[in-house]
Amino acid sequence: MERTLILVKPDAFARGLTGEIIARFERKGLKIVAIKSMQLDRETAERHYAEHREKPFFGELVDFITSGPLVALVLSGERAIEAARQVIGATDPLAAAPGSIRGDFALSVQNNLVHGSDSPESAEREVAIFFPELVGS
Ligand code: ATP
């Protein structure tokens, strides 16, 4: 079964949308393999978003993702990566389809509530950052 790393970002956590968001993944058929609440330090956030290091919004992105508690999950299922990204919706919430998490609940490109891995390689890398105990399982 494929695995993917999901973050319920600090904006979603602060708005009390954690349960609603996790329920949508469960209803899709994805299974929760691991789940925890935590606050990221800057070093971990910079590792997670390493591919965006050169982008003009990198500093703000790290400020945002470290600004409060978040929930990290590993989900598994058939084509879990693509399935989770469909449930999440496009990066820009105004381009995200109604019925997706971002389409229904977000306005801002930065504060867009959820992260989902975008490839098997990123899923493996991100699971290792948030759940090192799962590596090799
Ligand atoms: P994520 O990686 O969080 O699932 P994504 O794959 O849809 O989102 P990416 O292009 O990887 O989008 O961007 C990572 C995150 O960086 C976005 O979710 C968003 O929070 C932030 N971001 C992306 N583009 C911008 C931008 N133009 N301005 C501010 N923040 C941005």
Image (cartoon, rainbow, N blue to C red):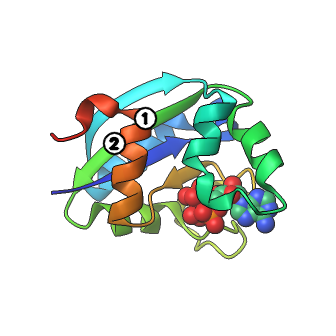
Question: Callout 1: few (<14), some (14-19), or many (20+) C-alpha neighbours within 10 Å?
Answer: many
Q: Residue at x 77, y 53 (%)?
A: 58
Q: CB atoms at circles 2 and 1 under 8 Å apart? A: yes
Question: Where is residue 78, by image quadrant?
Answer: bottom left
Judging by the rendered image, the residue that carries numbered circle 2 is 74
Classify mark 1: helix, strand or loop. helix
Amino acid type, label 1 = Phe
Q: Would residue 39 appear left or right of 56 to someone viewing this image?
A: left
Between 22 and 98, the residue placed more toward the observer is 22
Residue displayed at 75% across by 55% down: 110
In the rendered image, the vertical position of residue 58 relative to residue 82, given as above or below: above
Which quadrant of the structure image shows residue 67? top right
Q: Position of residue 119 (x, y in %)?
A: 39, 67
- Residue at image coords 36%, 40%: 128
The reply to whether residue 104 is visible in this rendering is: no
Q: Quadrant of the C terminus?
A: top left
Comparing 73 with 42, the one in front is 42
- Residue 3 numbered tag: none
Q: Which residue is mark 1?
A: 130
How many marks do you count on the picture?
Answer: 2
Can you tell me whether the CB of the residue at mark 1 lies under 8 Å from the nearest atom of ligand 1? no
Query: In this view of the protein, which residue sits in the foreground, 23 or 118?
Result: 118
Three-letter code, disc 2 = Val
In which of the image's four quarters is ligand 1 placed? bottom right
Q: Residue 104, how many percent across, how many down?
A: 62, 60
Which of pointers 2 and 1 lies earlier in the amino acid sequence?
2
Left or right: 82, with 49 as reference point: left
